[in-house]
Amino acid sequence: MSMVRRLIMWSCVVAMVQVASSHAQTDADLAVLREFKVEPTAAGVLEFMRKRTPQPDKIKQVDGFIALLGDEEYSVREKATRGLVDLGAVARAKLTAALQSADAEVKKRARYALDRITPPSDDSRILPAVARVLAVRKPPEGAEALLNLLPHIESAEVADETAKALAPLALDKDGKPLPVVLVALASTLNVQRAAAGSALASGAEENKNLARKLLGDTAVGVRRRVALALVEARDAKALPTLVELVGSESEEDSAAAEDALFAVAGEKSPEGPPAEERDPRGASRKIWEKWLKGDGAKIDLTKVEFDAPGSNLTLMGSIDFRAGAGVARRSVVSAMDNSGVIKWKVEVGSQFQMHASMAKRDRILVSEYNYSRVQEYDLKGKVHWTYNVANPIAAYRLRNGNTFVATRNSLTLLDREKKVTRTVTRPGYDIASAYMFDDGRMSIMTTNGMLIRYDREGKEAGSVNTGRFLNVFSRVQFNADGSFIAPDNGNNVIRSYDKDGKQKWEAAVANFPTFVTTLPNGNILVGSRNTNQIVELDRSGKEVRKRTGSGSQVLFLERR
């Protein structure tokens, strides 16, 4: 998992937004409410949230059926499975939790039921929007309604985004936590404890003390979320918890904690462990423990910028054909939010950039294919770093400061001084898409549809033949667990595969799909070099919506 994807996770989880102060955000949220026919009043949003929250009798039914998924009697298991499917969307959150069961039969049946219940494609748009409007309206029952809803949101990312709205609702007129928030601090449900603790993290010292108690919570996800919220509230007492989380068994929590530490340390961030380190996460924790005793002990959190310009955004490369007669067409890398709104643009030197990724919090790495170079730009378009290499197709800045560069026939790792520390060369010029994970593993997809994995030493570690040819401009979504999503340009479909190359689903996408990338909520963006349309699919491959550019050809999408 790369730095940019972790920066995205960090932003999604910890940003404690002040919703009432952003008129633009409120206007956008009201537009979403109109689209979903939700009355934008306090009563209207409360009614929506209460309808979206399963009633106790339904929750009891769901719990009862899930408890029977592993029953000894086949007929009982079958009846419970059918019952969960019949209950529909109200069962999704608890079925998703059941996927973590140690019982293989429970996991299998939970997956079966989930696959037959319509995915909540719209949750990522409507739930956070409703919650933010609720925070602006501030009805007395708002905190309770929000806390009751959170356990029934399937996606952790959507739940985190929705939970941010609790902070403006959590206190009474005297600045004291509401009784319902105090109860949530001791809830048996992780999502409620995390939400309540995070909501109190930016308040008065006595409220911070209540939040700090959760730094010792038994659930690593709760510790991570509350620690991040406290650090963003400039509370240095939470830094040791973040350091302790680095290298934890949960890759997501470890990565989010380390990204926060990188944000805090800034230009004085310690260098990560070498690529040949056998225990990179354990080594990283030791490095940060040393930092905490040195530079970390002197850090001034009031000077730290937590909201990265690349956070929670999708990078898009395009050629602008709208320039007037006699004016050269422009090549642009832009950053697009989840609603398709362009937040910033950088004009780059190449008219044929193959790829871009976030290099630092305000820098992008651009693979300029026709100029045979990779360049690092700031957001004003100034070049700060150049590496000359023939026909680069992708480049990523890793967490330890090294840079991975892929070309049509090579995979190269550079240290901070641009010294080559590892190279893998292919006999033919057949690499269509490539990626390096932060632990040093690499994956490529060739133009003849062969997925090849390499270990941290650059030795081939396995391959999967999809039997599907890729266009040379294709871009594959490689995941840390070995699964991947690839376009099939000629047949106008994209396909999702597990780590063994077994196809999970396919979805028809018109007009020569060329590149895919995933959003934090699990949805998938698909684009094509033949059109300026971007299609969003849910996790089952069902189309959610389309976005259309304005007179530009899309060259790539990147969100890691």
Image (spheres, rainbow, N blue to C red):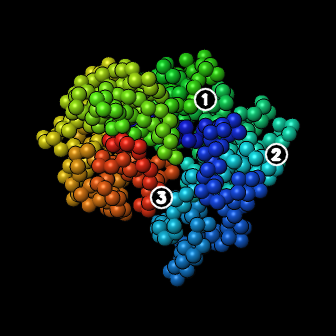
Image height check: is 44 above or below 318? below
Name the spot of residue 197 as percent of width and height, x first.
70, 41
Give percent across and percent down for residue 86.
57, 76
Residue drawn 31% across and 56% down? Answer: 511
| Res 499 visible | no
Where is 466 relative to 390, above or below? below
Closer mark to the observer between disc 1 and disc 3? 3
Q: Secondary structure at mark 2?
A: loop
Mark 1 secondary-structure assignment:
helix
| Residue occupied by mark 3 | 544
Q: Mark 1 to mark 3: distance in Å? A: 40 Å
What is the secondary structure assignment of the residue under circle 3? strand
Q: Amino acid at mark 1?
A: Leu
Which residue is rendered at x = 57% and y = 21% of the image?
296
Q: Is residue 373 left or right of residue 279?
A: left
Q: Nearer the viewer, residue 432 or 482?
A: 432
Instruction: Give the residue pinned by disc 1.
Output: 239
Residue at 26% across / 27% down in the picture? Answer: 373
Q: Quadrant of residue 18?
A: top right
Q: Residue furthest bottom?
A: 75
The image shows residue 530, relative to residue 24, as above or below, that is below
Between disc 1 and disc 2, whose residue precedes?
Answer: 2
Would you name the residue on which mark 2 appears? 178
Q: Which amino acid type corresponds to the residue marked 2 in the rendered image? A: Leu
Residue closest to the far front: 325
